[in-house]
Image (cartoon, helix red, strand yellow):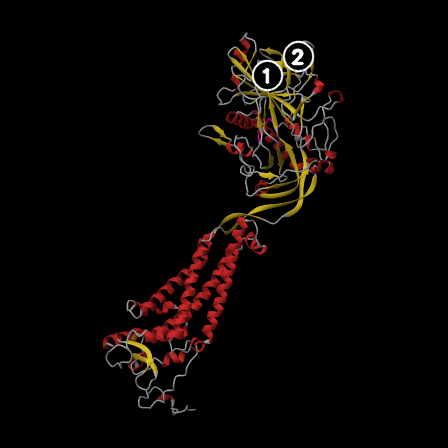
Amino acid sequence: MAYAGYTEKPPHEVEKTERDVTPPPTPMPKPRRFWEKLGIYNIAVLALGTVAIALALAFLLFIWGASTTARISGVFPRLWFLIVRKDWAPRVITLSSVLIRVATAAQLGVFAAILAALILERVGVSTEDLPLVSMIRCLNSGPHSLAMSVAKSIFTRALMPYSVLIVLAILNAFALQFTSTILLNDFGYSDVVTYGVTDNVTIGLSEQELTSLDDKSGGRQNPYGGVDYWKVGPATYNRFAEYKEAGSQKLEYMDTGKTYRGFLPFRDFGERASLRNYTGPMTVVDTRVICVKPTLGNISFYGGDSSGDPSIRGALTFSDTHPDLIANEQLGGKGSYINCTIPTAEYFEGKSYANLSLCSIEYGQARLINGIKPDPDLNVSSGIMGQTSTFLLLQTTGNATEWGNSNDTLVNVQSSKPSWRSFRKGSFNLNLTACFVNPLPSEYEVQALSNHDDFDVELDWNATAKAYNSTSIRRMLGATGGSLSAEQRGLLRLLPMANWTAADIKTKHNISTNHFIWDTLLRYSSQPVVDEETGPTEDVYTQTTYFTENAHPERSVHRTHVEIFQRVFQETGDAGLALQALWTVLLEMAYYDFFPQYDVNATATFTSSKTINAPVQWRAMGAILGLLAIHTALIVAALVLFNKRTEMSLLGNAWQAVSQVMTTDTAAAVHHGATTTDREVRGSMRHGGAADGRIRIAHSVHGGRVEATAVRQRNGATYSAPVGHV
């Protein structure tokens, strides 16, 4: 079969060049619209690439934006939380980055084809680079394929704008290859609040499962046996919830203010640390402490008891100057007899501790009112003793021998410290303050909040200084003398209830928490109190506790309790704060000690934080957005230039790319290149001087054919158009 104008030849004659055959007439170029010049394939690449980049970028912005709002406001979409909760975010970033890289690489192939067309039509290239640059218009190979061509004449004035575009595109494409690596630099671990969960929590022991001291039946819990929390220290000081009102101080008393502390019904420390919002049942205790200046009547001093320690005895009374502290009128103003051992210096030697002891007094001295749980009216004759506990704190100077050998009498002296009564015996001082607390626990429906995570704390030991560091614990317990809020101290903020009595659910669930929490504060003594007039009285609670681990076993407490109490007292001078810190620790120890045995459940709704790996900043994302903006600008600039400054290039058409190279100016190179390498062709051209020429696509001066035409004078060239016609 033969085509029009040609005669079909046998195969053995195909190799012969038909130099003498007259070519058909050159067809007149048809006017082409922009989309025709660009090509359907290239349009599809640009359009689909833009859509792919937009989708990937939108998803990335979704991840970054949701991470930001989650950190700031705690609001986030469920899809985002699903991704970060399962730690899928890095994988999503990698996949999105792959999509961006593929799309930008494809678009840069079109960009390279456009730049090749612009260079060929407006500036020209060296003769040796002509075939490659022409073929780039239909290969979509990327801007790097133009690198060597522009490198030879990068500083040529006419080629400079295109060289800048090509170099910028190459560098930008290189940077975009590291999209995922760059984006992951924005990642970090942060805490976000999860959606609320409604679940059962254990809140206490059933009253029916408790046994009394006299009950010998088996299978039930005995909350009294085998526990003395004064003698052991906690492994950790657990986070809790707190509602606190400001305290007050006057000459006759010091008041810590209402301080309601709720123990979190979670055994796992991680659950306590991450808890942000809790609505449900919680054991709450009122740890408010009021210390007043006591009055001692019928004072007698004993130089040494069976252990050789001096003691003070007498009748304890006080004036109810505090509006929320009401003295027991049933005592008839006589008060209660006390028998308290004096803390002397030998037990505190080698320590930077004050000589302090705590004397437990029998119930019924007074009652605290306006607290979280009303204390009943006192009626000693009917057996109603109330729930308010009374303690006498003693501070002295001098050792036991000095106190025992002194023949001086106790003299009442003026005290400069509020709520303290002072005595002097020769050169030795004795200071006393009476403190009251009603920490009767109960279960309430409460709400507690926190805006950040915080952890249980531990008592640190400094091996070099051989001393404890209790700063973090004292700060948590609000015993540093500052005015930090609950959340600043790592706690949850317990919201106040309009009616705490109505919120009490102890009866509803038949729980008796006081059997194992409130009773932890008791320290019993069977030592009779001797009254000078009436003789020995009945046994009363007058156990004395020394705040040093060097005391006799029956009077000592655990060294960690000593450290907390002593440091609070020394740094604040506030006996109420020191006792409040100590009692909070003891009550909390009892609560969590029995926690595994709790058998009463109730429903609670709570939200917690979760540590996730997600974007925590926008720096890397900003860099990628900048790179994509440069990429978009390069594509748009190339399209505008292609539309305005090209006429003879139809991208994606291989026959046109080959045909335009086949001219009289390139005939020798084409003829020689049929059986040689590019390197050999370049060597031949340089040897013959043809390599110095410059070729561009233009209308030939002979017939107007669109072809590669020399634009710089060289051997055998036909001059066409001026160089630099950009």
**Residue 288 colored in magenta in the image:** no
Residue span colored magenta: 229-233
Q: Main secondary structure of the magenta part?
A: loop
Q: Secondary structure at mark 2?
A: strand
Give the side of residue 325 with respect to residue 416, left or right: right
Pick the residue in front: 359 or 212.
Answer: 359
Question: Mark 2 belongs to which amino acid?
Answer: Val
Task: Please say whether residue 674 is visible from this viewpoint.
Answer: no
Q: Is residue 721 visible?
A: yes
Q: Is 162 rendered above or below residue 543?
A: below
Residue 227 position in % (x across, y down): 64, 28
Q: Is residue 232 magenta?
A: yes
Q: Is residue 293 above or below residue 665?
A: above
Instruction: Indicate which disc residue 530 carries.
Output: 2
Q: Secondary structure at mark 1?
A: strand
Label tally = 2
Badge 1 amino acid: Thr
**Can you tell which quarter of the image residue 241 is in?**
top right
Query: Residue 497 location, x and y as percent?
Result: 66, 38
Image point (58%, 56%), residue name: 79
Mark toward the start of the polypeptide (1 vs 2): 1
Crowding at mark 2 (Cα within 10 Å: few <14, some 14-19, many 20+): some
- Where residue 404 appears, as percent x and y from the top left, is 55, 10
Work out whether 437 lies above or below 671: above
- Residue beneath disc 1: 341
